[in-house]
Image (cartoon, grey):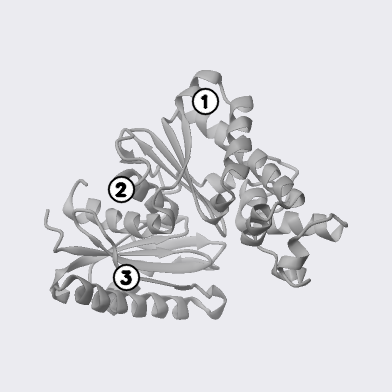
Amino acid sequence: MSDRRYIIGVDLGGTTIKVGAVPVGGGTVLGMRTLPTDAHVGAKFVVDRIVSMIFEVKRDAAREGGFGEDAFVGIGLGSPGPLDREAGTVIETPNLGWRNFPLRDLIVKATGLEAELDNDANAATLGEWWQGAGRGVDHLVGVTLGTGIGGGIMLGGELYHGTSDVAAEIGHMTIDFTGRKCRCGNYGCLEAYASGPAIAARALEGLEAGAASLIPDLVGGDLRTVTAEIVSDAIVAGDDYAVGVMRDTAAFLGAGLANLINILNPEMIVVSGGVTRAGKHLFDPLRREVRKRAFRPAAEACRIVSSELGGMAGVIGAAATYHLARLGGL
């Protein structure tokens, strides 16, 4: 198909919104925009911000590519869930505080373009399968580590949604039934241990207990500003305490991925999100933990890799969501 037709991809996360124009046939994303979600301001604010970003992307992409705004065929939306894809609604999302929210129709009304909605982690997984690390892989699991932990499952080259669009809520598998309380209300969810905020919380607990670390210096002594990114920065600086926090994160995540490998027997797991900045300090202990816990033939058959698309996976995958629904196969 011609690369002169474009789909607007919207990656809505608990922390940031990313919007870009993706060629129908795949390729370079134009007009990228990234802004904070600022969900605490309210749902209307978030929707207005998304709409404003869409119009800015259309303008800038058309200018960059030298084409008219009639080249835009539709919008793909990736949002935290659970969702009702057919109705275009966000049923509930702890990280945004929305319930039964008609996101798709609000975007359609404001932009005049048709839109399709899917889970943001499903979209990121689809993006990696289409244009990233998972090209040519039939059985693929995507795991996104961010404000929450999301997931997507490709089986036989098709995205698996389950009976009620709730498949692959990987962050909400229980890894300790008496463990930490998750924002979803359950106890012991993987997300409560290995998401960005959970990593920061565990790091802070050790610091408050007197652990020696460079982290306080990196935040100017204000421990309230510790984030998973700060922990990664401390790792790069050679901080042993931060390395230990990431090693524990890898163990929690490894337990969850071993469960997935034993159940699904995938060929590849693609891990994306800011936490992957830790590089080998995350992936080496993660792979060791998986080898300890998963059945050997399944573990040996599964490659655990970092995202190739990085922060673009959700935008590209959201566009792919629209493509599949409205234009046919990728």
Q: Badge 2, how many Cα within 10 Å: few under 14, some, many 20+?
A: some
The residue under label 2 is which amino acid type? Gln
Residue 256, above or below 302: below
Residue 157 placed where, x, y %? 30, 37
Which numbered disc, 3 or 1, marks the residue that appears first in the sequence?
Answer: 3
Which type of secondary structure does the marked residue at label 2 adopt?
A: helix
Residue 68, above or below 196: below
Q: Which residue is mark 1?
A: 299
Question: Of tags 2 and 3, which is closer to the observer?
Answer: 2
Residue 260, above or below 242: above
Which type of secondary structure does the marked residue at label 1 adopt?
A: helix
Which numbered disc, 2 or 3, marks the residue that appears first in the sequence?
Answer: 3
Alpha carbons under labels 1 and 2: distance apart: 25 Å
Question: Of tags 3 and 1, which is closer to the observer?
Answer: 1
Which numbered disc, 1 or 2, marks the residue that appears first in the sequence?
Answer: 2
Residue 218 placed where, x, y %? 71, 66
Residue 272, above or below 77: above
Q: Residue furthest right?
A: 210
Q: Residue at x 46, y 60 (%)?
A: 91
Front position in the image: 186 or 51: 51
The residue under label 3 is which amino acid type? Asp
Q: Residue at x 52, y 61 (%)?
A: 93
Residue 250 placed where, x, y %? 64, 41
Which type of secondary structure does the marked residue at label 3 adopt?
A: helix
Mark 1 and mark 2 residues within 8 Å of each other at the beta carbon: no
The residue under label 1 is which amino acid type? Ala
Q: Which residue is mark 2?
A: 131
Q: Badge 1, how many Cα within 10 Å: few under 14, some, many 20+?
A: many
Residue 253 appears in which quarter of the rendering?
top right
Q: Residue at x 14, y 73 (%)?
A: 67
- Would you say residue 174 is visible in this rendering? no
Q: Which residue is mark 3?
A: 105
